[in-house]
Image (cartoon, rainbow, N blue to C red):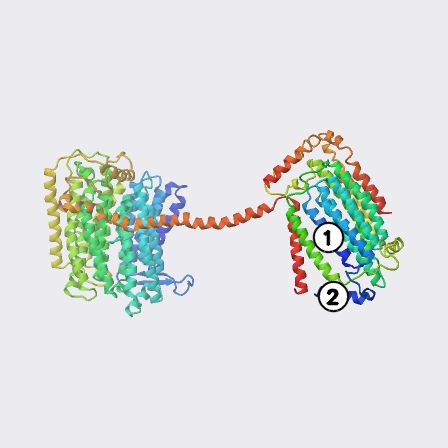
Amino acid sequence: MTLAAAAATAAHATATTAADPQGFLSPTGVEIAFLLVGLVTLGAAVVTVTTRQLVHAALWLVVALGGLAVEYLLLTAEFIAWVQVLIYVGSVVVLLLFGLMLTRAPIGRSPDADSGNRWVALGVAVTAAAALVWVVVDAFRTTWIDLDGAPAGSTEVTGASLFQHWVLPFEALSVLLLAALVGAIVLSRKAKTEAGADAEAERAAATAPGAPRSGATRRETEGTR
Amino acid sequence: MHLAYPAVLSALLFCTGLYGVLARRNAILVLMSVELMLNAVNLNLVAFDVWLSRAAEETLHSGQALALFTIAIAAAEIGIGLAIVLAVYRNRGTSDIDKLRDTAEGHEPDGPESDVSGSGASAPRTATEKAEATA
Amino acid sequence: MTTTTLAVLVPLLPFLGAIAGLLLGRTAPGFVRPLAVLPTLVSLGLAAAVAARQGGDGAVDAATELTPTGSVPIELALYVDGFAALTAVLVTVVATCVQIYSTGYLRDDPRYPSYAALVSLFTSAMLLVVYSGDLMVLLVGWEVMGICSYFLVGHYWETPEARAASLKAFLVTKLGDVPFLIGLFALATDAGSFRITRILGAVANGGIEQPTLIALLLLAGVAGKSAQFPLHTWLPDAMAGPTPVSALIHAATMVAAGVYFVARLLPLFEASRAAMTVLAVMAAVTMTGSALAALAQDDIKRVLAYSTIGQLGYMTGALAVADRGAAVFHLLSHGAFKALLFLAAGVIIHAAGTNSLAAMSRMGRLRDRVPDAYWTMTVALLALAAIPPFSGFFSKEAVLGSAEHVVTGHTGAAPAAAGWIVLLAGLVTALLTAAYATRLWLLAFRGDGPDAADHGRQPLSMTVVLWVLAVPSLALGGLAFRVLPDWFDGHDLTPTLTTSVLGTGVALVGGIVTYATWRHTTAHAARIPLGAVAAHPEGDPGRVEAEAIASHEPAYGDIAYAPDPTDPGRLLLGPLHRPAAAGFHLDALYTALFVRPVRAGASLVRFLDREVVETYVRGAGTLPRWLGAAVRRAQTGNLQTYVSALLAGTVVLTVAVVLAATGA
């Protein structure tokens, strides 16, 4: 196949060190670890999208995201791994749990967690997975990553590249985060006109406006860290 | 390490998220699935960055930088998304995507439900059944 | 002014009068009567001047082409020969009489302005036909006459008879006009021109390739316009119109147009012996059949209508033996006495309050109520019956004489068979004509019973016209038969001894037999009071007539028939009486042959359209409707469904692109 051939040629041309005779039948320890953690991650992700208990889904999401952090570590991208743990596991999941609570998500098994669309969704997902896996495997089956030597994603290396080459997008991103902050506040604030009729409803959901605002504030601090 | 491992894992995670986006009924679960998809992309970015940083002489670490940006943008997205879900919930008394069918033909526009604070658990369910019956 | 200018003004003046009458009819009612009478009167003077200047010499021929119109040019052409000049004089005389008469006859009619304007337009169209030297321009006048007759016959459109009659007149004449138009085109294609002079030149040079076909096509139009068998059925029904309109149609315009047209193009018809024979047969059937039918009619106007058809048969008979001088001679004299007959009949109907001869025969002293109509009608009936020395005698003898010429082989212009047919039919018809004229006179004026109601004297405008028309009816023939050959082809129009004796003899026999029968029936039959009499005998004549026509069918059960045992026609005709009264059931035959199949076809087409075509249309709509319903089901409003479809499509496309890129 031309795609695989092109990828292989590129790999041979650019990475002569990766040409060592390695194979699937002689996995290294890192590979085994990656595989096992990957299985756990995938399993947690699958449970996340299939479980009927909404809060459990959020907790399984923690497992999946944590597993991904471990994968980052195995790939020697340690800074991203810690950022992953901090932001996703620490704040995003907490935020999602707040959202579940604020929308009165039922505790326990809810019979209608999946819509009637699920078989179509399954078909699309499986087809997409098959296509992607086929293409990816076909393209990169002869490509290896050399994980020896200095870690590719240490804090020093990442910080240097970020503030040398990527400083302008970084600042633009902080503006975007500010806009998201303002947007979240505007969206979650109650309109003044409906204050009269829905006063009791507002009092009942009194915690609703506070949570996103605090979450956004926290994220803002983390994003500009 | 074989590059196919992270690539395949990323593809599978992406498709799992895809399934979640298409199949879940609760809007917050849909947001979770979106997070899964974003993380799958992140894994791809990191893996290929590591591979290329070894293979090339000079590298910008663009993969890792983009992964960081994606994480930040995902955080912003989840904030905005949750705010929207909350606003919808406050207006409609539900966060079920199935019930947000204002664009369907013959859908009679239902105003803000009055029993938001009351029997919030039973009213959305009957409304959901009605929506499915008419669909 | 040159003769050409005068001739142009003759048809133009009534036309302008009609336009002005239509425009001013509502706003200035005082101008309507002058606008109706004066243009026609001036036209009469101009037509007489044209005739005097033309004087039977060479034809006045002028033409101007307004604009190129394609392969065959259409020109505004004028062609005034002796025929045209004298026919125009007749038309204007009768039209003037009719207009003057109408001012009295329809004096209280609210629709008089439009009526007078239409009569003017009718006159103008006929004059256009008479003077035109171009067949296309002639056709314009021809068709304008058709539409005018439609409006005028339907003048009393409140009555169903008038509505049906106007539609019938229009449709039947149009039925003839379609082949007529095709014939005109064929003729122009062969001759390369619509000009009559060029066409006649082409005929003389043998340039017409299909003379028989063209002549027969043209004959269809002529039969429709001139009410010849088998397209004559509209004329008796057209009696539902006002009497002056009947006089106009029967005497001067419309029916005369067909005969005049054939007279103009007679060389073309002579070129085809088959056409001449068909013409002769048509004339013979028309003559005898209409005379029989006239003998059985109860409505005085229908009697006159059938007599018109018969006299037109004489004219076509004269044409069939290739003597257009005799034909136009009879056209002139017939125009005079037939106009007189109708106008006098209008007076009688007003005085008697009925149009039924059976009812009139039960009124005493009717002739004393209308002495003018009595005397003038007597003159006109004698002319109709061709008793010497009235004008009808000379013109009819001219026709019979030319037929006899053909029979005896003095001229080779027409087949001898045509001559025999015309001669025999003419003699039989002369007998019948005398019979029904006598019957009409006896029943109308020699009635016995309670005195007719006295409505006072008739208006002067109506009675004077009768005497004016009585003069040519009395004297035209005797004075004109020596002069007219100079104007016409030069054929001798002097009565020959054989036909004179024969014709007058059979006419006298017919009259005497009818009189004897009448004496017999009136002596023996019981005096059954009969009557269809108008409800408002003191109203204006037009209203009386409309009521009389409308009440005839309810009173007698038939528009043409009355169960009258004192009718001499009943005894004379015997078993033929009932079919003759119904016009030999031609209408029923046409209904069975044409009307019912057409109606059935229409309902079939309606069924096909409603049930079959509509089904296909609905079926064609059903599939998209189903598709639409199916597609509509996809629009659930659920975003996830939409995204699923979107992503599925994306996956399919991606796979396809990858496969294509890798060449798999």
CA–CA distance in space, label 1 to label 2: 24 Å
| Residue at image point 16% right, 41% down | C443
Q: In which quarter of the image is residue C460?
A: top left
Pointers 1 and 2 in contact (C-beta within 8 Å): no
SS under mark 1 = helix
C250 up-or-down from C203: above or below: above
Could you tell me which chain the residue with mark 2 belongs to? A
Could you tell me which chain the residue with mark 1 belongs to? B
Q: Which mark is residue A6?
A: 2
Left or right: residue B21 versus residue C193 is right
Residue type of the residue flagged with mark 2: Ala
Q: Nearer the viewer, residue C623 or C465?
A: C623
Left or right: residue C100 versus residue C638 is left
Identify the residue position indicated by label 1 in the image.
B12
Residue C561: image location, x then y, percent: 21, 42
Residue B27: image location, x then y, percent: 71, 42
Residue C81: image location, x then y, percent: 28, 61
SS under mark 2 = helix
Looking at the image, the residue that sits furthest to the front is A25
Q: Quadrant of residue C515?
A: top left
* The N terminus of chain A lies in quadrant: bottom right
| Residue at image point 67% right, 55% down | C651
The crowding category of the residue bearing disc 2, from other C-alpha atoms within 10 Å (few below 14, some 14 to 19, many at least 20), is few
Q: Quadrant of residue A181?
A: top right
Residue C257: image location, x then y, percent: 29, 55
Q: Nearer the viewer, residue C574 or C619?
A: C619
Residue type of the residue flagged with mark 1: Leu
Left or right: residue C142 versus residue C525 is right
Q: Nearer the viewer, residue B56 or C10?
A: B56
Q: Is residue B110 visible?
A: no
Q: Which of C179 and C206 is in front in this view?
A: C179
